[in-house]
Image (cartoon, helix red, strand yellow):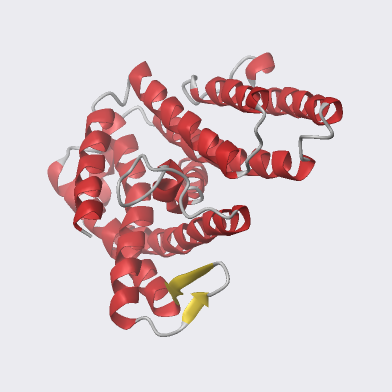
Amino acid sequence: MKVRVITSVVGLGILALVLCFFDTILFNLALAAVALIAVHEVYMAFSLKAPWVYGLFAAATLLVMLNDGRPLPLALRMPSVLFLLALCLAGSVIVRSQELSFAKVGGMALFSGLIWACFWSMLYVRAHFAHHADAIYFLVLGLGFAWGGDTCAFFAGHAFGRHKLAPVVSPHKTVEGAVGGVLGAMAVGVAITAVYLACWDSPLQQAADSLWLYLVIAAAGLAGGVLGILGDLTASVVKRQCGIKDYGTIFPGHGGILDRFDSVLFVIPFLALLLSAAFNF
């Protein structure tokens, strides 16, 4: 537990440092580096043992992440990148059919797509808010839904857990822990919003005294808490089927990038879609 807490504190410090460069290319580079490590963890989990396959995914990752979240020229847009990647992967499977599993390549493609959607959504949010403090707030809000809910689920499960949530996929998760996680995500979201509106001058300030704002945040937190659990279980399914305990060792006490970001995978894209609908961008 002590190692996990220390790692979490250090991780939050690094996150704060990265956010200091939020409106620069350094933020893109930081996200690209994290995404590349995450994709490599997936590559290792599926034991593909084909370096050129990771090279293809790494190139696609850089094309996705090293832009500002706005539409790119046609040749670099997501459909084009995915189509070219699919062509290259299909050719690789055909040429190396005896050693390259189509099922494993497909699994890596699906998981990598989730990683790209998650981290690119952060760039998408940044690109559509002229007031960068608001963009940072929404990203921290999404991370709060995921990590706050994850933390609350851990403690609620240890204190009250009786009924298994998904015993085959993740034997230690309980229904009581999941409920605690969802309630925790709602509470963390409301707390982050209250602190932000009290401490920063923001165009959102006009909504600070509105009860409806906090009800909307709580509702988003409910959805975010559920999606955080779904992301966690999705990553657990892959680990169990691949026969591994953790995706890596980069975070002592936690595991790899994906062991720390699994609960974020669905939350940030959901939040980006929600903001796109709410602010019409």
Q: Is residue 184 left or right of residue 93?
A: left
Write down the quadrant of residue 80 in the picture. Answer: top right
Write down the quadrant of residue 248 in the picture. Answer: top left
Q: Is residue 132 above or below residue 74?
A: below
Write down the quadrant of residue 102 in the picture. Answer: top right
Q: Position of residue 123 (x, y in %)?
A: 44, 30
Q: Is residue 258 above or below residue 164?
A: above
Q: Position of residue 15 (x, y in %)?
A: 27, 36
State the residue at coordinates (36%, 60%).
150
State the residue at coordinates (30%, 66%).
152
Q: Is residue 163 above or below residue 104?
A: below
Q: Position of residue 184 (x, y in %)?
A: 31, 66
- Give 198 or 148, whichever is nearer the viewer: 148
- Furthest toward the left, the residue is 199
State the residue at coordinates (38%, 43%).
249
- Furthest toward the bottom, the residue is 162
Q: Position of residue 5 (x, y in %)?
A: 21, 53
Query: Is the N terminus in the top left, top right, bottom left or bottom right quadrant?
Result: bottom left
- Give 47 or 130, whichever is nearer the viewer: 47
Q: Is residue 21 left or right of residue 32?
A: left
State the residue at coordinates (23%, 38%).
202
Total count of labels: 0
Residue 281 in sight from this viewpoint: no
Residue 175 in sight from this viewpoint: yes
